[in-house]
Image (cartoon, rainbow, N blue to C red):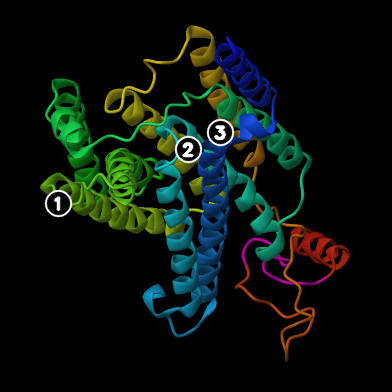
Amino acid sequence: MATLQLTQNVTFEGEEMSSGFLSSGWYYANQTLLLGILLAITGNFLISISLTVQKSSHLLLARQADQKSYYKSKLWWCGIVLMGIGETGNFAAYGFASVMLIAPLGSVAVIGSAVASVLFLKGSIRPEGILGGTVTVTGIFLLVTFAPHVTQEPTARQIQTDIVSWRFLIYVILEVIIFCILLYFYKRRQVKHIMLPLTMVALLASLSIICVKAVAAMIILSVKGNMQLTHPIFYIMLTIMVVTCVFQVKFLDEALQLYGTAEVIPMNYVFFTVSAVMAGAIFYQEFQAASPLSGFMFLFGCFLSFLGVFIITQNGGKDHLKSFYIDYGHIPGKKMSSKIQPDSHSLSYGSCCNEGDSVKAQSILNSS
């Protein structure tokens, strides 16, 4: 009787300690999940800074008279190192939380890019950015709250079984066909639209996410004592992960050379999130444990994140001319009335003379 009473007291105390949001019991039950979220947020913020640093290196190289490859730029390599650290944080995060939870947190990179552009690229703080940041943070909160909180640790045998399943084989075949078509138009036809490289990055990211989750899970199981590193599937997934990551960086850097960060980062986030969610749903079946309400709120959080990203980058990167004439004040040996272009139909074409003088000269020419 005393033993039964003691067991009831322990059970009651355990339930009381585990109840309550952010209580010690709640923290103990979700500390692995919180660690994954923290790693993902930190990693995505470093990635946003790395993309801004790479864009700065391209701008500096474009202004130099002696053009050299960006591979020889120390600033560009600093951006690559930061991206490597950020991707390492993301890699570790997939070992502690589900794909559907970690992947959408890439919106942190968009917010970080907006902040970095203000600090390093001399961008301006716009009301759209503040509104978009608020909407994005709201979406992140819904994503973290309603995403499938499954702590999967797939073994090597389970991965071998899933990788030859019909659903995954059909998914991979479709991805390979679409990727080859896009690569043909991008390389052979020289179609440089922003959709092509970013879509190829998303297709590669889908396979990369699957491999990252598998490799991270097998490493964690091996550390816990269940050795998985002796299975060939570990090295196959590791090789695919490295190859896809390298080509992601390649195509993403090419997109940055053609377009600005305000265009590349939001579109890359949307494409990456969609591909990652599809990969998690198809390969790891993370939506099976989600209720209809949680699934709806998760998709609504994705929508708010997409909307916030669109608002943040709206009209971003568009520079409007403040005047019709170029200021010669910083060019030695030039006077305000010196001409920089040949005359056209107007005496003021390409000159920096006063507007009143040009109107008078034009009237004289018309009267003659």
- The spot of residue 102 in percent (x, y) is 47, 38
The image quadrant where one finds the C terminus is bottom right
Q: Is residue 350 magenta?
A: yes
- The spot of residue 62 in percent (x, y) is 50, 73
Residue on which disc 2 sits: 102
Residue type, numbered disc 2: Ile
- The spot of residue 144 in percent (x, y) is 57, 30
Q: Is residue 12 magenta?
A: no
Residue on which disc 3 sits: 30
Vertical relation: 181 (above or below) 123: above
Q: Upstream in the sequence, badge 2 or badge 3?
A: 3
- The spot of residue 164 in percent (x, y) is 11, 29
Q: Observer-nearest residue: 105 or 317?
A: 105
Residue on which disc 1 sits: 230
Q: Observer-nearest residue: 33 or 148?
A: 33
Vertical relation: 334 (above or below) 232: below
